[in-house]
Image: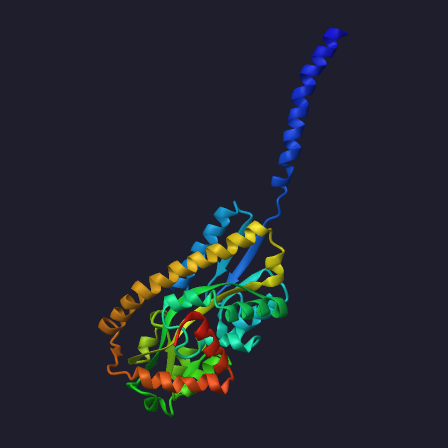
Amino acid sequence: MKRFGKFSLMIAVPLLSFLAISFSTTPAFAQQKYVLKFNHVLGQKEPYHQGFTNWAKAVEEKTKGGLRIEVFHSAQLGVEEDILEQIRAGANIGQNTDSARMGNYVPGIACLNGPYFAENLVEVGKLTNAPTIKGFLDELANKHGFKVLSFSWVQGYRHFFTNKPIRNPEDLKGLRIRTPPAPIWQESVRSLGATPVALAFGDMYPALQQKVMEGVELVYNNIPAGRFYEVLKYVSETRHIMLVNFEVISAKWFNSLPPEYRKILVEECDKAGIETSKLIMEKLEKEVKEELTTKRGMVVVDNVDIPAFKKAGEKAYEVLNIADVKKKVFSEIGKK
């Protein structure tokens, strides 16, 4: 009997050890996996698409496959406004958007896309710590269901692309210029002298061909992707809006993620945004400008009166009753 007992013990100890290891590793095998479907309206060759792809890769690696981001270019999942409503409803979907559209829910935050609000990447960085902006972001999440992961994504300066030289606000008088369908965009273009025309990104080329409008206000990188050099001649470098983009997902879905996933999702989004913005501002804008002027026949207008455009742009803030917001935020980031 003693020999049998010793033999039983020799079997039992390894068996218990195996069971202990098995039970301790079961949660890892049963770990819930998450998928975020991320939509943007830009083309596959735009620098933002590569930036979003880099973000997705980093998140998947750092969560060891627990959280994946599937990136959809060219509005494959639908138009921006429809996607935003799905986000509010709690869907596992995201959208590259801007403060102009977020201003439809929290009016004050639209100031980030107003004329000459942020004028360089340093100022954009300071805005992330401005108490007023933080308050707006909290309101978007808690009252409207939008979690802004990052707004470190800067697409460049918006300029006027037309078929006549634009040197001051008077030169825009009577010109129909395409803008996105949000109040701050409309009033910004109107304050600068033009008549705003709200059109979806994909409708611009045929509208220009048919002369439904006379120009657009876009960043340099949009021009080759949309082949707008075929229907527009002049670039007037007004730099009237630094295009700060927001990466938005559902606050409800975000809060359902494990805390470490939330942290990774935000940090990697910020990191990819900063890298992409620097690439655009320090390199790609110059390369696209050179291509458009040397190979595509576009002409950069000289002697653009920036002070006159800045002065004219103040009216947009007044019309939308956000002039006080602008003043307060400027004070918080030390801008005059």
Residue placed farthest to the left in the image?
294
Foreground residue among 81 and 254: 254
Residue 158 falls in image quadrant: bottom left
Residue at 57% x, 71% y: name it: 82
Whether residue 45 is visible here, answered yes or no, is no
Q: Where is residue 280 in the image (x, y as percent from the top left)?
A: 34, 64
Look at the image and name its color scheme: rainbow
Q: Where is residue 110 in the image (x, y as percent from the top left)?
A: 50, 76
Q: Is residue 326 above or below residue 75?
A: below
The residue closer to the viewer here, 2 or 321, is 321
Left or right, 280 with reference to 30: left
Tell me the quadrant of the picture where the N terminus can be found: top right
- For the C terminus, the quadrant is bottom left
Answer with the quarter of the image where residue 271 lies. bottom left
Left or right placement of residue 122 versus residue 167 in this view: right
Res 249 visible: yes
x 49%, y 87%: residue:
319
Compared across the picture, whether 89 is left or right of 311 comes to right
- How many labels sit on residues? 0
Residue in the picture at 30% in, 64% down: 282
Q: Residue 83 at x, y = what percent?
A: 56, 68
